[in-house]
Amino acid sequence: MYVLIQAHEYQKHAHLLDQSFRLRKKVFADRLGWRVAVSGSYEKDIYDSHQPAYLIWCDELQTRLYGSVRLMPTTGPTLLYDVFRETFPQAFDLVAPSIWEGTRMCIDEEAIALDFPGIRPDRAFCLLLLALCEVALENGIDTLISNYEPHMRRIYERAGAEFDELGRADGFGKLPVCCGAFEVSSRVLQQMREKTKVSRPLYRRLSFTQLGAPSPELATV
């Protein structure tokens, strides 16, 4: 299931958020070597105190985390402007109510392999991207901005996402960090569903899709 956790629901989903911060430390600090704020087994920074929304992929009992993305409006503080400003040209104005920043997107490859043995990591990323597009479209977002390493481009293309790479810069980790502007629209959503071969919605407000066991279409690789 895909759950959008907003500030007033943090306590209700504290267990999932705890797993998300632990996963972020494993991915961004340990594996990618990014200079991120680490406290013990958690990666948590000042932006997590600005009441962002979190898209969480978890099991139907909401006990095991498979992946997560942090969402923040560009009208407030963002990593985009405060940390990764060098990754896009000065001429670009990326601040608007309908432009949101998606950060810290990551998946737990071990948990997915255990519960969804037919889903490879790249397929898992594609599913999370599709759910992200659904959530953004439902909430009036028309552009998502994200920073990513160059190899992620092929995952975005495989998912059917439509985006422009605005720039890139070195000095943040082992590899360059790119900045991409992703279109959110009904057309792109349909394109992503065709590319991923997922016809039914992954995310639904109030009535969440159950993913207790992989369906044939989700297991397609």
Image: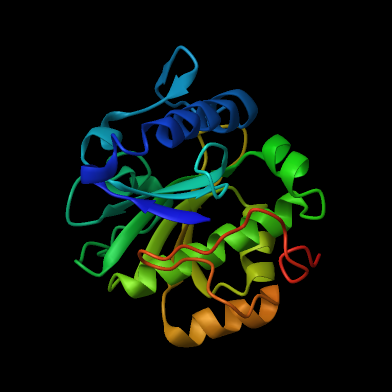
Q: Quadrant of the C terminus?
A: bottom right
| Side of 7 relative to 142 (left or right) | left
Residue 217 coordinates in the image, percent (x, y): 74, 71
- Residue at the image position 68 percent from the left and 37 percent from the top: 111
**In the depicted view, which residue is nearer to us: 12 or 85?**
12
- Residue at the image position 39 percent from the left and 60 percent from the top: 145
Q: Quadrant of residue 82?
A: top left
Residue 107 appears in the rendering: yes
**In the depicted view, which residue is nearer to us: 221 or 170?**
221
Residue 92 appears in the rendering: no
Q: How is the image coloured?
A: rainbow
| Side of 73 relative to 132 (left or right) | left
Identity of the residue furthest to the front in this view: 61
Residue 65 coordinates in the image, percent (x, y): 55, 40
- Residue at the image position 55 percent from the left and 84 percent from the top: 190
Measured along the vertical axis of the image, is residue 221 above or below residue 80? below
Residue 189 coordinates in the image, percent (x, y): 51, 79
- Residue at the image position 50 percent from the left and 16 percent from the top: 41
Q: Quadrant of residue 159?
A: bottom right
| Side of 199 relative to 132 (left or right) | right
**In the depicted view, which residue is nearer to us: 174 or 129?**
129
**In the depicted view, which residue is nearer to us: 168 or 136?**
136
